[in-house]
Image (cartoon, coloured by chain):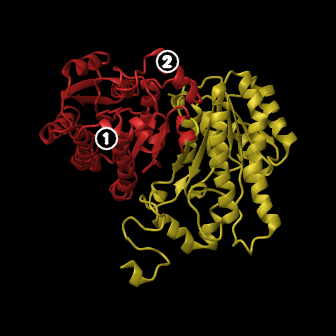
Amino acid sequence: MTTTESKAALVTGAAGGIGRATAERLARNAWKVLAVDRDAGKLAWAEAAGVASLVADVTSETENQRMVAETEARFGRLDAAVLNAGITGGGGIEQISFEAFQNVIAVNLFGAVLGVRAALPALRRQGGGAIVVTSSTMGIAADAGNSAYAASKHALIGLVRSLAREVGWEGIRVNALCPGPTETDMTLPVKDVAPAHYDVLRRAVPLQRWAQADEMASVIEFLISPAASYVNGHAMVVDGGAVVGTGLVAPNAGAVPGVPDEINH
Amino acid sequence: MGLLDGKVALVTGGGTGIGRGTALRFAAEGAKVVIAARRSEKLQETAAQAPEAVSWVRMDLNSPEERARALQTTVERHGRLDVLVSNAGAQLWKSFADTTDDEIEEIYRTNLASTVRFIKQAVPYLERSRGNIVIVSSTAGRYVLSPSQLLSVYGASKAGLNQFTRAAAPELGPRGIRINAVAPGLTRGEYADEGLDRNDEATQAWIRSVTPLGRIGEPDDIAKVITFMASDMASWVTGQVLDASGGWQIAGG
């Protein structure tokens, strides 16, 4: 199912977490990979692993174009774009600064928009290809104090569904990955800063743990592979089953955090 | 190295279409497969295409005894059960007003009640192997798509399976079992359905016009997605309904 010889992919947000795990997995499985991030220091892993890398900021139109041109220059082609770069931006709607809110949208939404616009001409040159955008279970569900992030991730699903109908005709498939809580450089601070929140999220998952980044990378690999040749416009939730419910009820304990006992029983 | 090396699977409705495609792809990925359905000759045809990996047992999904026998036969032959692909079901493309009471009973008994009862019978085996279940649902179970007037009765049966998939996941997860569904769009079948001959040129042209990928789904398009869901690549996926429809579903959301 993973006959991907000589195919080329670019992965944004590849300094760590899901992006790095994806770049590593694709490289292991015979893909040619360009790992892209704005943080040069955190891309050092790529050089050590023999994976090509590029420092670029996804909020810049010209840097998105440069990242695609670099992939084609190195590998002669682009078959898949994994647009994974993203930032968190917590805080209530009146607490978060408007500038911070705009920044979340700029990176998470406009970064993907620019990435798609840069990648499409290169994918057309191959007669088709695949795009995967990293959304979130916060692209489907929502929580208090996280509106900027949730708005950006909801918007990505609208983007993906629209594009699936817009460019599917050209043999280009567009899908979204919606990870649940995953242990990455971006999210692990939660464990130290808010251990109770970390534990609430852990207990909301039927398998009672956070995901590892490679458990997202394997689904991204599937979505860009020929195995998913008829999957288009899908928002693929990968969360151990957490959001099939409200996301609040621990499967074993049956307790609802934050709800008074008299309601819970 | 295959995605399902060493795994044992039971595929219902394995004589034709998506079930046959799934059995053969599972075999190619290293699994031992038992296929179960009503028509022995179709089962034999499928098994003959990969005789070293695929064997068959006759099963009527609506018979509790035959369901139990299919599970037992699988474990007797291969020692375990890792994957249940619940693909068998009844189809109905027909105006709701024209549907008979018997047809309504038959659709819900087969697609919903017997499927859920079969999964219940399989859980003890899957708990031992920390296995998983893949239900073959339908785009019609979630979206209202032209010609929706012909799919209300059938669609409701698949909607029931979708919700069963979601709601059973938190119960099965702590027991080590994943459960997911795959929702095919218009997929080539062995026979023409009432109200829609999928092999007819006019229908093919219509399918191309409503499907962003511009073609009808082939059984292997769906089999590949079922293989992914059944494999360790989807180790963190449970309670999900995965659309495999070439993008047909988006317009009707």
Type of residue at label 1?
Asp
How many dots with numbers?
2
The disc at residue B82 is 1
Please determine whether, in this image, residue B135 is positioned above or below residue B186.
below
Kindly report the distance in space between the C-alpha atoms of the residues bearing marks 2 and 1: 42 Å
Q: Is residue B193 left or right of residue A118?
A: left
Chain identifier, colour yellow: A
Q: Quarter of the image holding residue B26?
A: top left
Question: Residue shown at 33%/35% (left/top)?
Answer: B7
Question: Residue shown at 80%/37% (left/top)?
Answer: A67
At label 2, counting other C-alpha atoms closer than 10 Å, the crowd grade (few under 14, some 14-19, many 20 or more) is few
Question: Residue shown at 39%/33% (left/top)?
Answer: B4
Q: Quarter of the image holding residue A253?
A: bottom left
Residue A90 in picture, x, y percent from top left: 69, 67
Please determine whether, in this image, residue A153 is positioned above or below residue A233.
below
Please determine whether, in this image, residue A145 is positioned above or below residue A59.
below
Q: Is residue A97 left or right of residue B187?
A: right
Does dot 2 land on a helix, a strand or a loop? helix
Can residue B151 be seen at all in this image of the molecule? yes
- Judging from the image, mark 1 belongs to the subunit labelled B
Type of residue at label 2?
Ala
Looking at this view, name the residue that lies furthest to the right: A62
Looking at this view, name the residue that lies furthest to the front: B97
At label 1, counting other C-alpha atoms closer than 10 Å, the crowd grade (few under 14, some 14-19, many 20 or more) is many
The disc at residue A105 is none
**Do the residues indicated by labels 2 and 1 lie within the same chain of the protein?**
yes
Residue denoted by label 2: B202
Chain identifier, colour red: B
